[in-house]
Image (cartoon, rainbow, N blue to C red):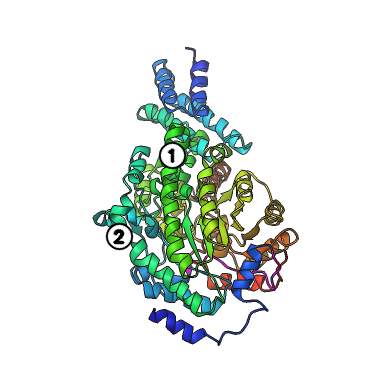
Amino acid sequence: MPAPELLERLAGAIVRLSKSEAAAAAEAALAAGLSPYTIIADGLSRGMQTVGEAFRRNEVFIPEVLVACDAYYAGLNVVKPLIDQNDQRRFFAKMVIGTIHGDIHTVGKDVAVPVFQAAGFQVIDLGTAVPDQQFVAAIREHQPELVGLGTYMTATFMHTRATVDAITEAGLRDQVKIICGGPSVDAETARRMGADDASDNAWDAVEKMRALVAALRQEKAARA
Amino acid sequence: MSEVVDRWVEALQGKLAPIGTMTHWQRLEAAFHGRPSDLVPVAPELDYWQIVYAGYTHPEIYNDVDKTTDACLKTWADLRTDAIWMYVDISHQIEGFVPKEERAEKFILRGDKDYLLFKPLAHTLDEAIALFEDRVWEKYGGDSRAVTHYTPHMLQLLEFQEKMGRQVPVIVGAATPTNQAETVVEVQEFVKWMITEPEAKVRHFLELCLQERLEALDFYRDFGYANGLRFFCCFGGARTWGPKQLAQFADVDARFVEKAASIFPNVLWHICGHNLPEAMQWVGAQEGIHAVQYDMPYYTQTLSWREWCESIARLYAGKKCACNAPTTQLACYGTPAEVEVAAQEFIEATLPHTTAVVMPGCEIDAYAPAENVRAMIAAARRYSGGA
């Protein structure tokens, strides 16, 4: 099957909400010699973008988006082990993400991760209920430009400050921009707690993340 | 007979300065039924906030019914809202599904001012169905906190309500079938199953949840209504569903509401989060619901706060009392001035079309400043209630 058709099949699997089809299409694309990056960026991610556009037009809703995310992960898991250094350099920016300690909800993050990946971010997902020091260790290990702090509840969002403080105390605050995400976040409060921005919508968050990365790069260039 | 209740009754009976010309009960009841009231009622769902406000920590009240009730009554005595919301946490809802020896693993308490968080009780639809087919609550519920904490706390508050001559109503709520379905497995899993699992299997699970919830209503009739409970809140699930899922499955909640309305004369529907327009219309069509505690516009709606409130007021004109404002986020993060403006905008946008109750769409967060709660009360007290 030619590459354009393989990529169309990948994107279509996401839009059709089919995990099995997405995994099979990813296998087929790899077998045809497409790179993991191409499979993600031009296949799976394009499918997620299409789902996002349909969400904005009220043609699909949260349940469909969540299942689309599962389909995306099914394809991604096939190619993930094969992403090499060359592929990684083609991402726009690297991000570490997780819901903060005490918050076990995955619903927001499960949507955010594929949307961010679809937008060209390499996302290292630390999971849920992530202790502050695990964020610190992940920043040291992966050297991201962005840290995403997910919270589902208002109560846990209020703990964002503790996580930001841990990153600051570790001497890493000026290496990253921090964005909060989840249904109950508020940008002004996020900034008051030491983060840089917040968004309750994964697609809107992408624009904010691009702006934050650009600002960080300018700051780093000015410091150099 | 409860010592903590008697202490508060003695302290307050005949000593409370009147607010307006109606009692709190009369004011809230009038608004629920579309009648004029002297003032716009204000009844924020204070829930865990009142525990913190009263100076208690979560570990202090977790197994101490008297302290829990004391916190609610102290808060009401200070703030004089138009209803007392009983304290409720997630353990009340699901502990009865869990064997005693496994409960500690299922709950997470992060700190003194945090809610109790929980882990899913089932990871597949088959496991979830088994929980309900096996009626596990009959096995494990007897010593759960629903029995040891929730029920005595509810009865104490109702005792206070009755001894105070029904000046102020107690609001007690229960999860609807869709809420229960989502809670035992975590929302995101259930929401996905509505698409990925056979419709008949999802339907079977929801029917089991409905049966369990209808039996729960028997409890609220025998222990709540029989002891004076008249204001009942249905904590609706389905908050992240799309129109298709609502059309397929929301009827189980309608059947729950029908029975709730046959017991209680004042039924409130709680739908928090980003409210889907179709969900708001669905609620509006349910005859048993008198008032709707709604929240924020759906993600893709581009409405100002005032426009949003007005759109709901128009939708519910002649049918439902609208309850909202400020958002729980603003109540927690905003300034008192911002809170007042949000409450005023809600009232002014709503009253031309239907009655209004200042009642944020979700529970007030434990971190919300007391000044913000006072600000929403002050805003409501400046308006007479329309019809």
Q: Which numbered tag is attached to residue A138? A: none
Picture coordinates of residue B363 (x, y %)? 51, 62
On whether disc 2 and disc 1 are found on a single subunit, the reply is: no
Residue B198: x %, y % from top left: 44, 31
Q: Picture quarter containing residue B110? A: bottom left
Which label is found at residue A123?
1
- Where does the image place residue A7, in percent across and percent down from the top left? 50, 21
Q: Nearer the viewer, residue A91 or A100?
A: A100
Which secondary structure class fits the magenta region best? loop
How dense is the environment of label 1, judged by Cα within 10 Å: few (below 14), some, or many (20 and up)?
Answer: many
Relative to residue A135, is residue B376 drawn left or right?
right
Asked if the stretch drawn in magenta spans residue B230, the answer is no
* Residue at the right extreme, as displayed: B352
Give the number of the mark in front: 2 or 1: 2
Q: Amino acid at mark 1?
A: Val
Q: How many marks?
A: 2
**Secondary element at image label 2:** helix
Q: Position of residue B17 (x, y in %)?
A: 60, 85
Q: Residue at x 58, y 70 (%)?
A: B372
